[in-house]
Image (cartoon, grey):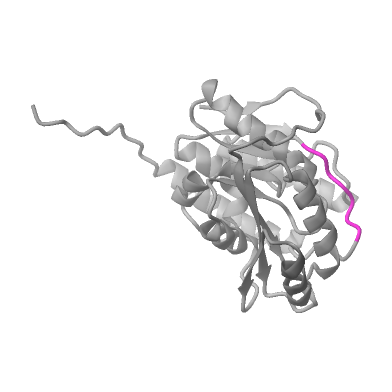
Amino acid sequence: MQPFFYPTVLSDTIFLGENVKISVVIPVHNEAENLVPLIIEIVEALKDADAFEIIYVNDGSTDATAAVLKQQQQAVSQLRVIEHAQSCGQSTAIHNGVKAAVFPYIATLDGDGQNDPADIPRLYHLLVAEPARSPNLWMVAGWRNKRNDSKWRLFSSKVANAVRSNLLGDNTPDTGCGLKVFLRDRFLELPYFDHMHRFLPALILRAGGVVHSEPVNHRARVHGTSNYGTLDRLWAGITDLLGVIWLIKRTKRTTVKEIERG
């Protein structure tokens, strides 16, 4: 089943209602200056939720990230912090954050502030509202159709997305967007490997799920520089791409039922 693209533009704010329980997972590496503004925005975006938690995964930061997060825990009761002794990469940080989450719905954000937390309620609404039309919907993925990035980053991302989509057939315009809302249990069923976060749509399709792509706001970075560079992603991505192609070709899905005693 192919992913579906919502033919919409950014909508007005959607407020979360009762019975909404969601965990927001943010991997960070040396993002001390971006922490407080983003936490404030997340709390504001989810203020109408029945319950939520914010899980920051400090991926071996060497700046003041740990100290700022500890300070913020005193002010924000929903904030949880997980620390890696050394940097393990974005996929490992996300995976460990999702494993630690207590709620059934997960939202992920990049820690640099370029993703807009105000989009989370809209993506959540699409995830919970659409199963009637798409019963196997596992994820609503953000699509940065109007990006605020350098020309080199835009170019490299466009090439990478085109190559990946052509080879994997995931029909997803922007797998690199950190803003996603998905089902926790389904995510944890996927095969885990380093850099897996860039192949989530293909992995979900392989497992029989559906991914929807939705335009989201994208902002310019205010503080710091990217800690997950484009060149290292390029070389690692080639190896990972071959591995994901192998996984897809080896996939075997079966229909299983237990016969009751008659």
Left or right of residue 186: residue 4: right
Dividing the image into 4 quarters, which one contains the C terminus?
Answer: top left
Q: Taken as a whole, is the magenta stretch helix, strand or loop?
A: loop
The percent coordinates of residue 69 (x first, y second) are: 74, 70
Q: Between 243 and 136, which is closer to the camera in this rendering?
A: 136
- Quarter of the rendering containing residue 207: top left
**Residue 259: in sight, yes or no?**
yes
Q: Is residue 122 above or below residue 47?
A: above
Residue at the far left: name it.
Answer: 262
Q: In this view, does 58 lie above or below 145?
A: below
The percent coordinates of residue 245 (x first, y second) are: 50, 46
The percent coordinates of residue 6 (x first, y second) are: 69, 25
| Residue 175 part of the magenta segment | no
Q: Between 150 and 76, which is closer to the camera in this rendering?
A: 76
- Quarter of the rendering containing residue 261: top left
> In percent of the image, x 20 and y 34: which residue is there?
258
> In percent of the image, x 58 and y 26: which residue is there?
130
The percent coordinates of residue 237 (x first, y second) are: 63, 55
Total of numbered circles in the picture? 0
**Residue 173: in sight, yes or no?**
no
Q: Is residue 34 above or below residue 243?
A: below
Left or right of residue 186: residue 39: right
- Quarter of the rendering containing residue 33: bottom right
Which residues, given as a range, are shown in magenta? 216-222
> In percent of the image, x 58 and y 31: which residue is there?
128
Q: Between 47 and 221, which is closer to the camera in this rendering?
A: 47
